[in-house]
Image: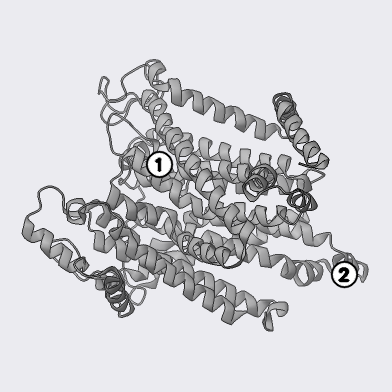
Amino acid sequence: MVARRALLSLITVWVVTLIAFSLVRLIPGDVTLTLLGESRTEEQAADLRERLGLNRSFVEQYVRWMGDLARGDFGTSLLPNRAKVGGQIAERLEPTLLLMFTALLFSVCTGIPIGVIAAIRQGTALDFVLRSFSILGLSIPGFYIATQLLGVLAKQWGWIPPIGWVGIGEDPLGVIQRIWMPALILSLGTSAQLMRMSRAMMLEVLRQDYIRTAWAKGLHERKVILRHALRNALLPVVTVLGLSMAFLVGGTVIFETLFGLPGIGTYMVNSVIARDYVAVQGATVVFALAVVLINLFVDVSYTFLDPRLRGNR
Amino acid sequence: MSVAGDQLFAAERRAGASRPSRAWRGLRRFARRQPLGAVCLVVVVVLIILAIVGPSIAPYDPASSDFDRLQRPNGTNWFGTDELGRDTFSRILNGARVSVAVGFGATSITLVIATTIGTISGYYRGWVDTIIQRFVDGVMAFPTLVLLMSLVVITGAGLKQLIIILGLIGSASSSRIVRSAVLGVRENAYIEAARSLGVGTPRLLLRHVLPNCFAPIMVSATVGLGGVILAEAALSFLGVGINDPNHPTWGQMLNRARKFANVEPIQALWPGMAIAITVFSFNMLGDALRDTLDPRLRGGR
């Protein structure tokens, strides 16, 4: 199971790089015209072709690009400073990773328990309230909630979130101050999805014969729910978690920009505005790889939780 | 052609003939069983009408600064005015057109591509399926917004480009839903029956497999529509989407309103509510459709 998942992830990684690599090469017409604009000089155009490796064969380009990528070399920025994109991304990894994992943690710690509670109390007012909130969480865009919240906080109490970044090693408290609010709002959507899925799965499992048997044996409610029902309901929930990873990772782009965190998302937005394609491509690859790796991590960790999957399957 | 075959095709024709009245009855039953879904359907219809007639019924020009800046909602400017003194109500009405155009345009593209890919993948299985699905995995690994931004750098952020890009991106995940539906349908006895009667593959797919996948395809398209509108809004919100002062979009308006939200938070309220209500309606409509169209869910809940 683990080996199979790892192999699939590896293939996905390969397809991801192939897509990211093809993006710039699929542009019809002159790439230099698209990326540099009408005012480019012939010198600049030749330089860009050289840097993107466009004067070699497609296969050769791809092999070289992959080789560079494997060494963490994402090429040099198209901006005049010619900064190394790989280095710039590495510098900005910390806020992005922290934001992602905190949001993931929040969504799992809220979504699954709330879903389970709603399922146990199916049809009650509590169930209705929880479900309504989850639908709201799915529909109201996080960036809108954040905008209103920041606006009202600033207007009523003059509170604005701290800007800039401090290393987690230097000032852990400062990191928490900067991270908790964007992470919480980012987690709302994923949390709502997880809640709906865990509720649906719990309801299905709770109707099974072995749950009735567990009740009939006179087991305590906590034991029936946690040991017998929850563990069997979690597998599809984990699948949903994997699917919503792309959503979560994409969300970091919005919330970093909104809260002024200097992460890869902010870097990507700035690079899009500056039309720095090499930087955009680098950030795109990093984000897609993050999604694949988190998925693999979630799958593998689940394999250890579920005894049925521990063997070879 | 055998007698049984003739009967089969006659039944197909009859089913086609009685469709309008069936659709109407279905709609009434839908409204009774899914009141919230029906309300959302009304919202969606109103949104479409607004997108068509909105710019002509808008009281003022959305692009010209005719009023005092940042007014509170009042009799003249129902939603107040923005930081340049433009009428927010007129701008919201105009924004509906962009959202609906992007949503329906991209989803139409997605429907065509996803149905084609998903059907081929699910019907033929084997190595064709494996190759297609690994590719779909790859596309799905990219967060929509990230891939969207990456392509916007290349193509520019015009309305047409956004529609095509969003349609292509959405095709990956939708094709997976079509595929799993086809995988389920192809095992049914009636497919076997049709095939043994000598129905060719194209006809089999179009008349027997796809109509039975209609429910999941419709549900995914409806939910996808909300997602596409949200993606466009997010892109505009980041300031890298459609940026044409004559064609305000909700995301763009929210982005501008965010910058002075500490002075006047109410201007962020309107575009935000417009996005939220639209996405909510499509999500709920998709949910209600799923409950109505999926026979397994039709009973008690």
| Placement of A91 over or under B110, stated as above or below | below
SS at circle 1: helix
Q: Are marks 2 and 1 in contact (CB under 8 Å)?
A: no
> Which residue: 36% across, 27% down?
B91
Q: Is residue A143 visible?
A: no
Left or right of A260 on screen, residue B279: right
In the picture, which quadrant includes the N terminus of chain B?
top right
* A274 with respect to B163 (left or right): left
Which residue is at a point 56% across and 72% down the rendered structure image?
Answer: A298
Q: Residues within 10 Å of mark 2 (few under 14, many from 20)?
A: some
Residue A54 percent location from the top left of the image: 21, 65
Is B110 situated above or below A280?
A: above
Whether residue B107 is visible, yes or no, is yes
Q: Quadrant of residue B12?
A: top right
User: To which quarter of the image does residue B6 belong?
Assistant: top right
Which of the two discs, 2 and 1, sits closer to the camera?
A: 1
Residue B252, x across and y down, in percent: 34, 39
Residue at mark 2: A214
Q: Chain of mark 2?
A: A
Badge 2 amino acid: Ala
The chain containing the residue under callout 1 comes to: B
Q: Which mark is residue B7?
A: none
Q: Going by the image, does A36 lie left or right of B198?
A: left
Q: Which residue is mark 1?
A: B163
Task: Tell me which residue sits at (71%, 35%) in the image.
Answer: B34
